[in-house]
Image: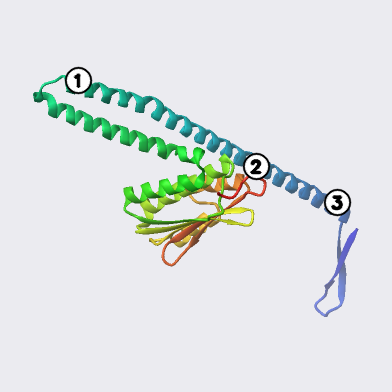
């Protein structure tokens, strides 16, 4: 029991009466314990739901990667083969046709060649076969070369010679970070060059993409660093990396910005490149 007593004074300073109050400390402690338990239960529920949402996000990204791989294979194996067959048929017809339609055949060949080229490009952008066949190093080099030609942005890629094969999920995650980051540079930064490094630090794979463009506005940068960004691409990258036990950071540079990713490969069957 907590008892408090204070005097009520007359005008001459003498005590007229005493006024007291008491509080049942046990009841107060019980209330505080109930509130604390409720708070802990609520935090536990929030953590569980956050974990569930992260897992859902990871599952969606995995399904997306599988669909990209399937569509890429279908483009190559079906549409690509149909176009090749059509080109062969045109070649045979051209050999038995007069000179009056020669230009028409030539134009048709050019259209088919363009369709084949674009189909191959789309297929590889969805899921480069080099990623499965040769790993991140080859896929990154192929993508960077193509991106530089398409965008006019000079890209310098530095890959650690010790970098070997990693699991499919790690190589796919790092490739998607590279792909999304360069797409954002092309769309938003105005940078005319990009530096990319892929290296090993202990048992971690580290990727850094640095541009020299306009960078991020202060509030946008704070949102990105706090995980509150409105960018679907960057949010998806962060979730993908976090699910794999890694860290993605966005920082301001002078000029431009940098995206860095660190992924643990301690439990992966990764071997140095030959």
Image point 49% across, 41% down: which residue? Answer: 131
When the figure is inspected, residue 29 is found, relative to residue 116, above or below; the finding is: below
SS for dot 3: helix
Please state if 57 lies on the left or on the right of 118 as rendered.
right
Q: Of marks 1 and 2, which one's residue comes earlier in the chain?
A: 2
Residue 173 spot, x, y in % from top left: 53, 44
C-alpha span from label 3 to label 2:
36 Å
Of residue 112 and residue 226, the one placed in the foreground of this image is 112
User: Residue 51, which numbered label?
Assistant: 2
User: Which is more foreground, mark 1 or mark 2?
Assistant: 1
Label 1 CA crowd tier, 10 Å (few <14, some 14–19, many 20+) = few
Q: Disc number at residue 27?
A: 3
Q: CA distance from mark 1 to mark 3?
A: 97 Å
Structural distance between the alpha carbons of marks 1 and 2: 62 Å
Q: Which residue is mark 1?
A: 93
In the rendered image of this protein, does residue 252 appear above or below residue 36?
below
Q: Position of residue 135 (x, y in %)?
A: 51, 43
What kind of colouring is applied to the model shown? Answer: rainbow
């Amino acid at each position: 029991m907590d008892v408090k007593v204070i005097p009520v004074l007359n005008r001459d300073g003498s005590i007229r009466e005493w006024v007291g109050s008491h509080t049942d400390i046990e009841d107060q402690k019980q209330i505080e314990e109930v509130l604390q338990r409720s708070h802990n239960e609520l935090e536990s529920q929030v953590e569980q739901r956050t974990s569930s949402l992260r897992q859902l996000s990871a599952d969606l990204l995995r399904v997306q990667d599988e669909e990209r791989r399937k569509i890429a294979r279908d483009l190559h194996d079906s549409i690509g083969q149909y176009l090749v067959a059509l080109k062969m048929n045109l070649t045979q017809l051209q050999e038995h046709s007069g000179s009056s339609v020669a230009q028409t055949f030539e134009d048709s060949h050019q259209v088919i060649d363009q369709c084949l080229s674009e189909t191959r490009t789309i297929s590889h952008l969805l899921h480069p076969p080099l990623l499965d066949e040769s790993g991140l190093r080859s896929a990154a080099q192929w993508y960077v070369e193509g991106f530089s030609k398409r965008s006019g942005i000079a890209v310098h890629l530095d890959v650690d010679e010790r970098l070997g094969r990693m699991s499919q999920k790690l190589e796919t995650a790092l490739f998607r970070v590279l792909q999304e980051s360069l797409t954002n540079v092309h769309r938003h930064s105005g940078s005319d060059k990009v530096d990319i490094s892929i290296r090993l630090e202990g048992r971690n794979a580290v990727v850094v993409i640095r541009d020299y463009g306009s960078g991020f506005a202060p509030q946008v940068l704070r949102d990105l660093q706090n995980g509150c960004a409105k960018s679907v691409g960057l949010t998806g990258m962060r979730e993908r990396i976090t699910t794999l036990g890694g860290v993605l950071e966005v920082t301001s540079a002078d000029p431009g910005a940098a995206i860095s990713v660190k992924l643990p490969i301690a439990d992966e069957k990764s071997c140095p490149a030959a």
